[in-house]
Amino acid sequence: MVLTLMINGDPVPYHGDPRRSLLEVLRDDLHLTGAKDVCGEGFCGACIVQIDGVPKVSCLLPVGRLAGAEITTIEGVSNSETLTAVQKAFLEYDVVQCGMCFPGMVLSMTHFMAENPSPTRAELKSAMTGNICRCTGYERIIDALLSLGSNGLGPVEEVRP
Amino acid sequence: MTLPYPPNTAVMNLPRRDAKDKLLGRTRYTVDESSHGMLHAAARRSETASGRIVKIDVTPALSMPGVKAIATREDAPGLHGIGIADHPLFAKDVVRYHGEPLAVVAATTLAQARAAAAAILVEIDPIAPILTMAEALAKDAPLIHPDWASYEILREGAARGGNIAWEATVVRGDTDAAFARDDVILVEGTYRVGRQSHVPFEPRAVVAAYEDGRFHIHTSTQVPWTVRHVTAKILGVPEAAVHVTVPAVGGGFGLKFDCSLEPFAAILARKTGRKVSLVNSRREEQMTCLSRENADILIRSAVTPEGDIVGREATVLMDCGAYGGEQVFLTTMTAHTLGGNYRLGSVKIASQAVYTNTPPNGAFRACNGVYNTFALECHTDEICKAIGMDPVAFRRRNVVGDGDIGATGQVFEGDVLGPMLDLAIDTYGPHERAKKGPDGRLYGRATTVGTWFIFVGPSSATVNLNVDGSATLVTSGVEIGSGTMVQSLPQIVAANLGIHPDAVIVKTADTDASGRDLGVGGGRTTVSIGAASQEACAEVRSKLLAVASQMLQTPQDDLVLAQGRVEIRDRPGSGTTIQTVIAQAELEHGPISGSGAFTAPGIPAMPGCAAGHFIDAIDIPVFAVHDCDVAVDPDTGKVEVLAYRVIQDVGRALNPRAIHGQIQGGVTQGIGYALHEEITINAEGAFDQTGFSSYRIPTALDTLPIDYHLYEGAPSCGPLGTKGAGEVPILNVGATIACAVANAIGTPVNALPLTAPRVLGLIDGLSSGVDLAHLSRHWHENTIAFSE
């Protein structure tokens, strides 16, 4: 099967089995290793990418269903000069530890904050259940996101593809 | 040692330099390594827990598409281990656990490797597996290692025998006399805990190459020098033929404190002449996790009506699984955890690693301290109930203080736990009676104490001062996520050299470049590598100041290093930049560098007290006081943690914000252990929990903001008086939640995790309890060393 994937704004031709997961294609074929292969069953959120702006677990997405969709991976969200507001908050609050969950965390929480610009702590915690982290115990990540909520969320728009 | 700079210059909330790339998805962990021509490997593992190998035929697999090499038991005949060499790389004649490696295949693609691994013909004659310690210790139980007596002993002094891989004992004073006193109350407690899986997001993974007659192993490990040593031992090559490098590690928590997949990949790299990647699938990672071990614990105490513990006897059975592994070492820790916290008039402790036909266990953050603290603190509350004494008052009366002796007779220095307990009660208020709330839930609180240690031992460091005024720190440290390599170490070096931490380049582990090191774990990195780094800096300072002294015509003692300059004391702007001094030094002597080393100072124990221990006394004790409130729903058994508070002995907090991150994360892992992380072993000897959907680690909804206080000033030989702060936050979480639940429901708790059904069983009085019929109440009968 031949199809064209739109990845981070670039057309990428794909020849192969349409049942392969997007995660496998990103990591093994395209060497975009920001999305992490952690649980393989859609639980942990470490492989999250945005499909047409909506966070999805790429380990469960057959690549054959993605023709025409805008796929944004962590590599396409920003560059080191223009971190998103969520990335900046995570940096400023020193919340990163081993780092494996953060690409997915950034992509899902960026979307959540754009949809819910002034969330409560409880809303943030509910939203974060799809992103499991083994190191941090979450609460400092929530603190970082709450700092954005009260300050408004202007810069987050720029991450939308 | 007096410092040449104010210690506070090393204290700051330095941000992590690795955070940005981690947030951008650019960090390349071992699992992200890929290159053209790299082969992928897959393992064939036993699906039988116990059996005799009849046949392993790789012929059909070898001719499958893409297959380049297959390695089996013939390729690695040696045995390795800790304390005893009992562990082959591949199952040899017998299989001892479900998941034991039988062969590994290297192929062009991972799918080809997996297909070929599945095609290997394996025939095993099953033998009834021994799945519990009770079965392993039964009279006439078959031996899991019939040849145990012939194994190479790597450390002398322990009693061993039958299915007991290792025994460590402590005998101090006369417990028989204490228990026979007519004024004492005897309190007995039995406890059982299950296993806990680390679930690092990066599984164990390695990329190996064989180049110029040497192995290059690029791996996700906490212990590069152990990987070097064990790989060489298994392959029968000189250690110098193994080169280990470590990129960012995606979580370890102790799981990666041992050699694991590296020798398999090394063998395949040599066979193929190609780079070989071997990564555990999540299922393999879970099912062969070197978990925190399950344990059975019996404690008996003789206590006076006034609250003195005049005698204590304890036996702790630690399930090591099919091979001794870390549990052999960890038998040591029972003396210092279960035997810790309190002054004991007399004490006998037996701590045994017991073989079963289950996956081997390993080290997990605060290792056996977590469950021994659980058992000890539950037992302490039961003592208080028996003698009618307030639990906080009892603890305040009995915690070890300055000049008190520990279980093995070591003399503790400084009053630490006592003032920490006082601070807890002053800050959080006295305990109220447990009560039923208007919502029908049962409310309870508990305050516990815990003793852990810093695993000191050899570290080395080199500091090169560069012409641009930056410094390069070369050690075998690894960044596993805790931040030590990017925060405390550059902070220490910068303070020593009067430069900004951003000007300290930190090289991570490369055994061809850095000196030997025990590894990153046991809370030791800031202490041991930090101390070695500080010593290396001292040499750099002295060389730098000798040249500056000439240039500035000022005695060295009157020179200070600050903000990248050498200044005459109290005369800012009087000196010159360090770049100028370095340039002058190059003209006179050459580039400036220094080296430093550190090892355990070796605090003595009382001679004759301890047998079979790797550490008779702890060089740097670390204390913790935890306090929590819980609510228990009597209809469902669900436990909610309402508030959680930590007072942690840190010596000196170099980066308070980073320590907060460790406390928040460590307590959350402890909440998982206390309430819902459970591994069950089925009749096949396999874990029922094979992934994230069945093994439930905490989500954001399972934790809460942890209140914390960093207690500073306790004695420590660490640099600037530091103690490791990352390991200990998990220590008494299981204990504190269990004691609070026991107070809430009015029934003793004797097992973890406190899943809702287990709590409901306790409330309804349906729980059968933990009888531990396989343990004798006559302590000596549980031992090898003291049984007749």
Image (cartoon, coloured by chain):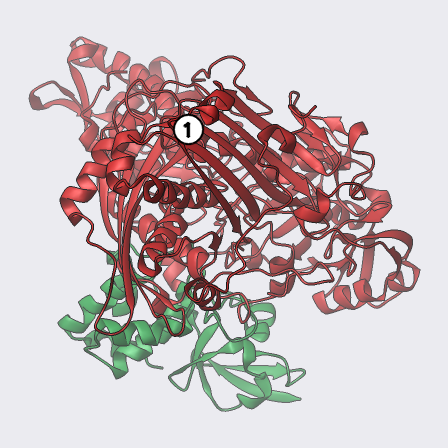
Q: Which chain is red?
A: B
Q: Which chain is green?
A: A
Q: Is residue B415 visible?
A: yes
When the figure is inspected, residue B205 is found, relative to residue B348, above or below; the finding is below
Viewer-closest of B459 and B601: B601
* Residue A24 figure quarter: bottom right
Quadrant showing the N terminus of chain B? top left
Q: Position of residue B605 (x, y in %)?
A: 46, 17
Q: Is residue B411 left or right of residue B47?
A: left
Q: Residue at x 37, y 27 (%)?
A: B183
Q: Position of residue A69 (x, y in %)?
A: 47, 88
Q: Is residue B463 visible?
A: no
Viewer-closest of B369 and B188: B188
Amino acid on which disc 1 is placed: Ser
- Name the residue beneath numbered marker 1: B528
> Secondary structure under badge 1?
helix
Viewer-closest of B745 and B639: B745
Q: Position of residue B374 (x, y in %)?
A: 42, 46
When the figure is inspected, residue B177 is found, relative to residue A153, above or below; the finding is above
Q: Residue at x 33, y 32 (%)?
A: B723
Badge 1 local density, few (<14 within 10 Å), some, or many (20+)? Answer: many
When the figure is inspected, residue B660 is found, relative to residue A147, above or below; the finding is above
For mark 1, name the chain: B
